[in-house]
Each structure stands twice: as C-alpha cells, then as structure tokens.
Amino acid sequence: MNRKEFIQKFTLLSFGLSTIPSLLGSNQSNKENLGLKKDVDGILDLPEGFNYSIISQQGDLMDDGLFVPPNADGMTCIDMGNSKVVLIRNHEIGHVPRLSTFFKNNPFGKNYRKYKKNNASNFYDIKGRKTHCFGGTSSIVYNLKTGKVESQYLSLAGTLVNCSGGITPWNTWISCEETSIKEGAGITKDHGYNFEVIPSLSPKLTKAVPLKAMGRFRHEGVAFNDVTGHVYQTEDKTDGLFYRFIPKVKEKLVEGGKLQVLSFKDWRGIDTRNWNKKNIEVNKKYKVRWVDIDDVESPNDDLRYRGNNKGGAIFARGEGIFFADNTVFFTATTGGENKSGQIWKYVPGKNDSDGTIELFFESSNSNDLNMPDNIVLSPNGNVILCEDGKGTDRLVCIKPDKTISYLASNALNNSEIAGACFSPDNKILFINIYKPTITLAIKGPWHQI
C-alpha cells in the first residue's frame, strides 16, 4: 500500500475524536541528513539493507469481529513457540464523555455493541452494557517463518489511556494507564492502574483486574528485574518520580507488595530535570536509596508529592523503560536544559539493594534527539529510542560512547513512533506509528546495530 492509498483508506475510516488533516498533513522537518533511504511509498525511511512490511493497521477487521482501533503505543513481543509470537499493543484512547459522538464514528465497528454485551464481565469500567472507557490492548498472532498475521483480537478493554507497559519474566504484558481520573461523569471506577494481559494464540479478552498495590498514578512503563522479581515504574508527569514495586509473590502481582520511590542518598528530593539549574552531571554515578511509601491508591492523586517529601527524586516525564544485564534504562522525555530529553541508567546493588544512578545522556539539541519515549536495547546492547517530539519523529540509536545514528524516520506524518520491540531471534524489530495505527515489521542486519 502506498501513501496515496493509505490516505484514501483513512479518510473513510477516520476516528471521530481526531481529524485527518492533522494526522496526514505536511511533514516539514528540520532534521536532515539522517543517512536513511527515502521510502518510495512515503511511510517509513530506513537505512540501506533494511525493509519493512505493514502487518496491521487501523480499520483492519480482527478475528473477534472488531476493527483495529487507533492510537497504537507501547508494545511487546512474546514467544509462543513454533515460530509464533504474540504482539500485545496498547491503544492510548481516553475517556469519551459523549457516547453519541463516539458511536457516530465508532472505530471498533458495528459489532462492538454485541461484543460488549458478550464480554462485559471482562471489561474493567463498564456499567450494564455502557462504557465511556475505550482504551486497552489488541493482540496480533504473527508467524515469524511465513511473515504472516494469523490472528488479531482485542485483549484488554474498559481501561483508559493505555500508554506503555512492560513484559513480565513469565511472558505476560503489563499495560499501564496514563491517567489518574476518578469515578464520575460516566466513569464508574477510579483509574491510574496497571493491568496484566495474557497472550493467546486464539482470540481471548483478558479479564481486566487492576494491580492496585503497584500504585495509582499516571503510569507509563514498567520493567522487571528477572532475578529478584522487583518491578521498576516510570511516571509521565513533569514532576514525576521513579518507583520500585516489591511483590509478595513474584508471579502474582495481584497479591500485593510494597511500593517505594528512588531517592538520591546525599540529596533528598533532588530535581534531576536540569531545567533552570544543572543539578546533575552526565556520566557521574550517584548513590541512591529506596524509600517506602504508603496509601498507594492515592485518592487525592498526591503520591508523587508525598514521595518527594520523603526524599524521592523528581524526573521530567519518565516514560520508556527497559531492563537487561542488571541495568535499567529509562527516559525522561522533557528532561534537560532545552527539554528535549534525558536517558537515565540505574544499576542495582547486590540482590537489588541500593545501587547507583547516572545520567547516561542529555539532549542539548532537539535535531539530535527530540523527546525520547519508548526504549529498547539492540542485540549489541545499544539504546534504541522512539521519539515523540514536534516535527518528524525517528528511531534513534545511542551507543555507550554517546555517538548517535538513525534507524528509521516517519515519512508518513508527524505522529510518534512507538512500541519498539524485537522478535525472540532479534531478526525483526516491530514498531507502531501511533496515529493512524500502523504496526510494521522491520527486517535487516539488526545484529550489526
């Protein structure tokens, strides 16, 4: 499908809460000389030797009778054996106060009313057969050998603003709500929780159960220490904190546990954003400690304030997060003097005791790196970042020596690139274009990256 065909399709399938001109308008950018080959179809520019295929897109009819919804964000790839994987993909759709407006331009299709009736017990926020909450996840069963999609279906429903999340060591997906909206005005339950989604080779809607002990706040992403079972969490607020959850039972997060916030050992409540004053130096290791926090369901949405008062460090919109080789990388999307982004590196101590944190990278030029969001590590351990800034967004690679290269550029529109995750054999990188939803499989010499 070329750019013209794609635009024609989504002019007909436009989601009522957005407008096509803003999605597919002029794509002027000041980011030049990226070393990428221009895509003749005008969707995704890539380096020489790489190619992509579109495996799923907004408006596709799924196997449960629904259409693929908009706003594809964080995503994971789960190995199911026999060359099959399940991609679980977040959809960052918010509260819709006027249902008449929503259903006039219903992105799920005509079968959605019947689907809600038959699956209401598995929705999170629903009353009778009505819900104002259209976030959640969809799942794609993909065959690595044939390169074909074998099934697609809705896998989490009745939640809100599902932004990112993280894969568990037992191969499920934690989907995070990036909102802390409370019950009222069509909302029947408080939001701001994490939900566990179970992969399946056949269409199956996971029962939505909030993991309340992990805290109620504006969640973004999670990453697991696969040895200790501890869970690191980012908060997408300009004055957000960095959290750690210690579950009572490793593989049963719903059983509860203890929530903590990260504090610099020698500087209580430090502001790491470097906006007005450069408090943090790049490449310098700072000792940290973890501070317990209570009342984690936070009815007043004040968890970050109470955590900061206890010494918790402030980060500028914590978003993407990834754990590998006893190291946590996470992004602060608007960190740094010009607010174009920071990359943080946390190394826990023995048995995940108090460790060290360092500012791995701080963008001083938005042309180099502009508001990093989702993050993944390449097969060689280099940091790969999805941008979510103004203008053209890209996939950016940063090596340990801080040299930068570019792995992809959105040639279609000014929507963010999101959800980067590798296949189990590291031969395919899957990504989303946020809006309209497009999920792509990128093949190439990833072992060289």
Image (cartoon, rainbow, N blue to C red):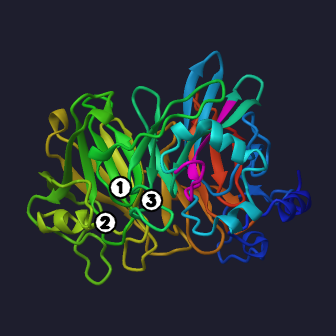
Secondary structure at badge 2 equals: loop
Inspect the image, locate mark 2, and give the three-letter code of the amino acid beneath it.
Gly
Secondary structure at badge 3 equals: loop
Q: How many marks?
A: 3
Q: Residue 220 or 35: which is nearer the viewer?
A: 220
Give percent across and percent down for residue 404: 52, 59
Residues packed near mark 2 inside 10 Å, few (<14), some (14 to 19) or many (20 plus): many
Question: As drawn, is 94 to the left or to the right of 2?
Answer: left
> According to the image, label 1 marks what residue?
234
> Mark 1 or 2 closer to N-term?
1
Task: Give the extent of the magenta segment.
Answer: 127-141
Front of the two marks 3 and 2: 3
What residue is shown at x 28% (from left), y 60% (from top)?
Answer: 283
Residues packed near mark 3 inside 10 Å, few (<14), some (14 to 19) or many (20 plus): many
Q: Magenta span has 122?
A: no
Q: Residue 288 or 407: which is nearer the viewer?
A: 288
Front of the two marks 3 and 1: 3
> Mark 3 or 2 closer to N-term?
3
Question: Would you identify the image quadrant in which residue 254 lies?
Answer: top left
**Separation (CA) of disc 3 from disc 1:** 10 Å
Inspect the image, locate mark 1, and give the three-letter code of the amino acid beneath it.
Thr
> According to the image, label 2 marks what residue?
240
Q: Residue 143 or 127: which is nearer the viewer?
A: 127
Give percent across and percent down for residue 118: 64, 36
Farthest-out residue, top? 82
